[in-house]
Image (cartoon, helix red, strand yellow):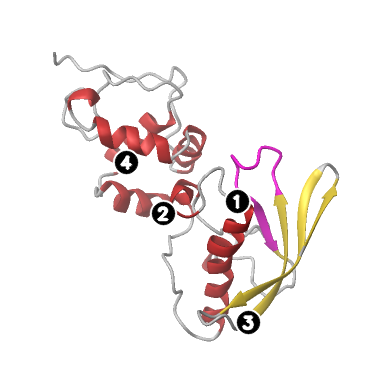
Amino acid sequence: MHLFVQGGAAIVRGTFAVYSPAGKILDRYRILIELPNNYPKDLPIVREVGDRIPWHQDFHVETNGVACVLLPDDRWRCFPVGAPFREYLDRPLHHFFLGQSLVALGEKWPFDEWKHGAEGIIQYYEELLDSQDLKTIVRYLRIIAKQNFKPHLLCPCGSGKKIKKCCHAKVVQLRRRIAPAVARKSLDHLGRPMPQTDSEPRSTAS
């Protein structure tokens, strides 16, 4: 694989090998990776350019050919901001293409697999928050999406208490893991964008 600059953008292009746990090469893919201008805040944009993977959500590929390598909300777990690019290649990207090879052989996808689009976002936060209530998920996302966090706001868990007297540690941890811009995009996918005023009701509890 080689790195070069094309039209002002950093591009990685070449053959990507998929390995077995024993270190044996199982498969190879021709790929193109574009590093966005604001990388590493935004994830690399990956395309398989050997015409092996259909452009369809069932194969975790957008209709424009961009591979859904990982859910942006979940990058803190496998490729946090600031991690070496090699870590992206060795973990989420390798898992993505290994999964493609195994599915082509008739096996099941071997790793965590989220549904496509809004369904996948809901599925992810249901597991992360241990809640199947969409309103609760949206409340948490809106707190994460705020640029300025105020612990006197109502707790997104729905208790009616202030955050600082309820799930303060949980909210702080989520905000450390998931960037506000990522939460905003997830809200947009869910059709629940942030209010223009970016405001939330305050608790009346003391």
Main SS class of the magenta portion in the image: loop
Q: Are marks 3 and 4 in contact (CB under 8 Å)?
A: no
Give residue 14's position: percent from left, percent from top: 77, 67
Q: Of the residues under marks 1 and 3, which one precedes in the sequence?
A: 3
Q: Quadrant of the N terminus?
A: bottom right
At label 4, the amino acid type is Ile
Q: Of the residues under marks 3 and 4, which one precedes in the sequence?
A: 3
Q: Are marks 2 and 1 in contact (CB under 8 Å)?
A: no
Label 2 vs label 3: CA separation? 34 Å
Viewer-nearest of labels 4 and 1? 1
Q: Is residue 47 above or below residue 169?
A: below
At label 2, the amino acid type is Glu
How many other residues sit within 10 Å of disc 1, few (<14), some (14-19) or many (≥20)? few
Q: Which residue is mark 4?
A: 137
Give residue 8's position: percent from left, percent from top: 83, 41
Does the magenta-highlighted stretch encompass residue 7? no
Left or right: residue 61 compared with residue 171: right
Q: At numbered mark 3, what does the secondary structure look like: helix, strand or loop?
A: strand
Outermost residue, bottom side: 105
Give residue 9's position: percent from left, percent from top: 79, 45
Label 1 vs label 3: CA separation? 23 Å
Tell me, for residue 119, which label it has, or none. Answer: 2
At label 3, the amino acid type is Ile
Q: Which residue is mark 3?
A: 25
Q: Of the residues under marks 2 and 4, which one precedes in the sequence?
A: 2
Q: Which residue is mark 1?
A: 84
Q: Is residue 114 above or below residue 170?
A: below
Place residue 42 in its image quadrant: top right
